[in-house]
Image (cartoon, rainbow, N blue to C red):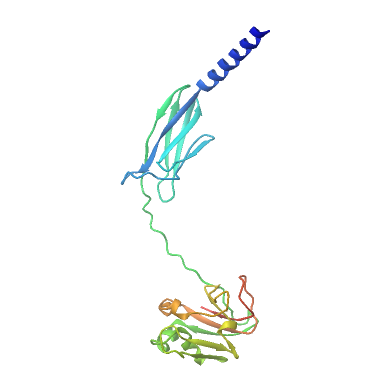
Amino acid sequence: MQKNILLYFFFFLATTTLAFAQKATVEGNVTDALTGEPLIGAIVKAGSAGEQVDIDGHYVLTLDAGTYELNVTYLGYKEQKLPVTVQAGQRMSLDIKLENDNKVMREVEVVADVARSRVTPVAFSTIQATTIKEELGNQDLPMVLNSTPGVYATQSGGGDGDARITIRGFNQRNVAIMIDGIPVNDMENGQVYWSNWSGLQNVLRSMQVQRGLGASKLALPRWAEPLTY
């Protein structure tokens, strides 16, 4: 009985070793073609096997014997595809150098939804960029709104970024001030620090004041009337 058990374990060990020997291994480093620096996190795939490059730029793939297309990708670099043929028990070393993808990123324009005449059921006033350039001068941005009905703005402190705005008697803590549709009011007290937005007037396309309750997809600190840039 004991001999049968020993024979069984020997047969099992031999079968496991044979199955492991049928596998092939492909390993190497993925680096920048120009600087030689390791591209940490690059993805190396061959068939259903895939591996992420480690902190040293190293990867290891365990494959069945056969022919594969090695696919190497990394953000900002050109994808590289390499034909690879491996045999059972083979250990192949393959270093890969990726070239930087020098595509220039296209300009992205972010525009918020604004009220439109005869479409949006709310009273509003829109100030165009030409008006802002002509009337604002070196004042804080809200000061150009003094000619808008229901709006009162003051630069009480005299320094840059000290402007305060009131719409229909509500101070700016109760006015939703949004840039490209994103609220910029402080989430604790609703205050707006205009000094954080110095230079915004140079890139504005338009400003819009909406008087009355408005809808927003984002959370606002309190009940507020919208002022959109």
| Residue in the foreground of this view, choosing between 192 and 182 | 192
Count of numbered labels shown in the rendering? 0
Above or below, 92 against 101 in this view is: above
> Residue at the spot x=61%, y=76% of the render?
221
> Residue at the spot x=61%, y=14% of the render?
9
> Residue at the spot x=55%, y=88% of the render?
166
Residue 46, percent from left and from top: 49, 35
Residue 13, percent from left and from top: 57, 17
- The answer to whether 106 appears left or right of 23 in the picture is left
| Residue in the foreground of this view, choosing between 99 and 16 | 16
- The answer to whether 42 appears left or right of 33 in the picture is right
- The residue sitting at the front extreme is 2
Above or below, 96 against 217 in this view is: above
> Residue at the spot x=31%, y=46% of the render?
35
- The residue sitting at the right extreme is 1
Quarter of the view holding residue 19:
top right
Residue 211, percent from left and from top: 61, 85
* Quadrant where the image shows the N terminus: top right
